[in-house]
């Protein structure tokens, strides 16, 4: 009896895994609308509930017992055994891959140092049920300070600071306004050279003006750049762009470029709103065109664009969208990530090419459910460094030393001098 129960639980675990695999990679990417939630519910019923109840109803059928017990003795039992064995093998293989990623995590060499500090944001009232309320991290905003070696970056740009703010989702949870205001004050204290806004500015059409006014509080010394996300396109992207045009924020989601030139070398910032701007894929050749000695920073709301951008030569990709999973389990981590790569890019720094680095921000806001569990929101504070050896135009830069970032705003003399924006 115990062996039969173990086989049944193993079968249920494999079904649940199949549900989340498809849910993460495909169903979460369905456009918002009246049919999205019914489709998700139907998939849950068809992939977990119905198969499991069917097996329970037919538990006394010899073929079912033989297949689950790995003892097929008939043609029908053999067919069912192959299906169940394949499902369970998939579950085991994926579980081993996840375990390997935890034991041997990818530590990209481009990440030279990393430090996490609490931002001291305004408190947020609990939203999770009492049983799991101690795991809530909705308002526990942190600043993740990182030094990142950027492929092709000229020594002239060494020390340039970029603050990334992502996924504010302004509007749905307006009780977070005090918290969001303290996040804006935190960015102001960091005094970044450049601020990048990587999408999902707003949740509802009626809040667009207020959302843009809020985002206009984020200002870099040299520029504030933005792309739009899926929630922005599910509201009114044209109106958002019109409102952004009234501010100091430059929208790059249509492939626009901002080029910072210094000492004869160029740092190019560009962006894409794909795939929500009616383009399944960006025109990468046009978007990431570069000359010898250039470095390209791409803004993309979803990290799903990163592998293709890396193949076309993007040096650094800044993304959000995945919220770090937003809801994480102890030890396991995130179990839902709205990405076609599943749990591959929930949040953090990843190597996506020989000379390309992806930074995925967990964002500062919340979306579905209105809360975070074991997944604190973050502001990413990046200090850009040239690679250890810069050979793009024949000059060598000294190796970057690993160091601990100081908890202070950059001094005035640290702001890059002699920089100019060119078309």
Image (spheres, rainbow, N blue to C red):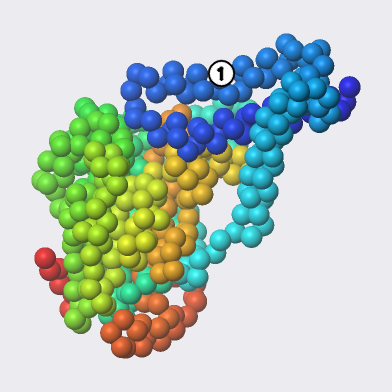
Q: Residue at x 36, y 51 (%)?
A: 305
Residue 232 x %, y %: 26, 37
Q: Residue at x 37, y 19 (%)?
A: 35
Q: Nearer the viewer, residue 33 or 18?
A: 18
The answer to whether residue 13 is visible is no
Disc 1 is placed on an element classified as: helix
**Residue that carries the numbered disc 1 in the rendered image:** 45
Which quadrant of the figure has residue 5? top right
* Residue 218 drawn above or below residue 338: below
| In the displayed structure image, the side of residue 320 where residue 258 appears, left or right | left
| In the displayed structure image, the side of residue 288 where residue 340 appears, left or right | right
Q: Residue at x 44, y 69 (%)?
A: 354
Residue 65 x %, y %: 81, 21
Query: Within 10 Å of the Cα at label 1, are there few (<14), some (14-19), or many (20+) other Cα atoms?
Result: some
* Residue 369 drawn above or below residue 400: above
The answer to whether residue 156 is visible is yes
Residue 166 x %, y %: 35, 47
Q: Residue at x 43, y 64 (%)?
A: 353
Q: Quadrant of the C terminus?
A: bottom left
Q: Nearer the viewer, residue 409 or 49?
A: 49
């Amino acid at each position: 009896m115990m062996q039969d129960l173990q086989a049944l639980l193993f079968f249920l675990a494999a079904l649940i895994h199949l549900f989340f695999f498809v849910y993460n990679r495909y169903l979460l990417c369905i456009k918002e609308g009246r049919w999205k939630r019914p489709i998700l519910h139907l998939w849950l019923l068809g992939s977990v509930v119905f198969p499991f109840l069917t097996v329970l109803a037919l538990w006394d059928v010899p073929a079912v017992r033989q297949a689950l017990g790995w003892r097929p003795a008939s043609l029908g039992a053999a067919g069912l055994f192959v299906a169940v064995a394949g499902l369970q093998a998939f579950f085991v293989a994926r579980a081993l891959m996840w375990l390997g990623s935890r034991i041997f995590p990818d530590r990209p060499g481009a990440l030279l140092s990393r430090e996490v500090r609490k931002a001291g944001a305004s408190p947020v009232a609990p939203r999770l049920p009492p049983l799991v309320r101690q795991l809530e991290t909705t308002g526990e905003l942190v600043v993740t300070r990182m030094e990142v070696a950027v492929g092709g970056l000229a020594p002239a740009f060494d020390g340039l600071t970029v603050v990334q703010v992502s996924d504010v989702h302004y509007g749905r949870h307006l009780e977070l306004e005090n918290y969001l205001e303290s996040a804006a004050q935190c960015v102001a204290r960091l005094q970044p050279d450049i601020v990048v806004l990587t999408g999902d500015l707003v949740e509802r059409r009626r809040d667009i003006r207020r959302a843009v006014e809020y985002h206009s509080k984020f200002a870099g010394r040299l520029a504030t750049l933005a792309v739009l996300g899926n929630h922005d396109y599910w509201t009114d992207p044209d109106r958002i762009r019109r409102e952004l045009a009234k501010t100091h924020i430059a929208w790059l989601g249509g492939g626009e470029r901002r080029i910072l030139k210094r000492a004869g070398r160029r740092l190019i910032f560009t962006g894409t709103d794909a795939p929500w701007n009616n383009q399944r894929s960006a025109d990468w050749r046009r978007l990431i065109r570069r000359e010898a000695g250039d470095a390209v920073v791409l803004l993309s709301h979803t990290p799903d664009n990163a592998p293709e951008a890396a193949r076309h030569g993007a040096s650094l990709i800044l993304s959000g969208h995945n919220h770090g999973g937003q809801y994480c389990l102890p030890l396991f981590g995130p179990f839902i990530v709205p990405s076609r790569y599943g749990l591959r890019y929930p949040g953090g720094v990843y190597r996506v090419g020989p000379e390309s680095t992806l930074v995925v921000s967990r964002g500062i806001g919340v979306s579905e459910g209105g809360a975070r569990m074991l997944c604190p929101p973050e502001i990413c504070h990046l200090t850009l460094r040239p690679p250890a050896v810069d050979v793009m135009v024949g000059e060598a830069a000294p190796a970057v030393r690993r160091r601990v970032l100081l908890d202070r705003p950059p001094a005035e003399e640290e702001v890059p001098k002699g920089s100019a924006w060119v078309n």
